Amino acid sequence: MLLNDIEFLTQKNAWTDKRIFSEWIERVWKPISLETNEPKLLLLDSYSIHKISENDLKLNNTIPIYIPSFCTGSCQP
């Protein structure tokens, strides 16, 4: 895959904040979600920023499912 085909966002402190997650929804998730009218599931950890953006996700017919706190590491391959 070419670097031009990869979407990524960064900032100095390397944290995800509301701005970064909102941009990710707009630039990455929204185009994917518009490919079908069917409901979509999106698995997220319980980070508060993900929950703040829940309404943005629901507008795109996305059902967010939150992995319980302190379980993310156990769920990753």
Image (cartoon, rainbow, N blue to C red):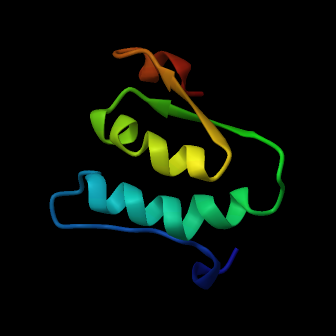
Q: Residue 24: where, in percent of width, then height?
A: 47, 61
Determine whether 16 is above or below 51 in the image. below
Q: Residue 63: where, in percent of width, then height?
A: 63, 34
**Residue furthest to the bottom:** 4
Number of disc labels: 0
Residue at image coords 33%, 40%: 52
Please indicate whether residue 37 sits to the left or right of residue 69 in the image.
right
Residue at image coords 58%, 73%: 6
Determine whether 17 is above or below 72 in the image. below
Residue at image coords 39%, 59%: 22
Please indicate whether residue 45 sits to the left or right of residue 36 in the image.
left
Q: Quadrant of the N terminus?
A: bottom right
Judge by depth and name the residue closer to the eye, 46 or 52.
Answer: 52
Q: Quadrant of the C terminus?
A: top right
Which image quadrant is residue 34 in?
bottom right
Q: Residue 30: where, in percent of width, then height?
A: 61, 62
Q: Residue 47: where, in percent of width, then height?
A: 32, 32
Residue at image coords 43%, 15%: 68
Determine whether 68 is above or below 54 in the image. above
Judge by depth and name the residue closer to the eye, 73 or 21.
Answer: 21
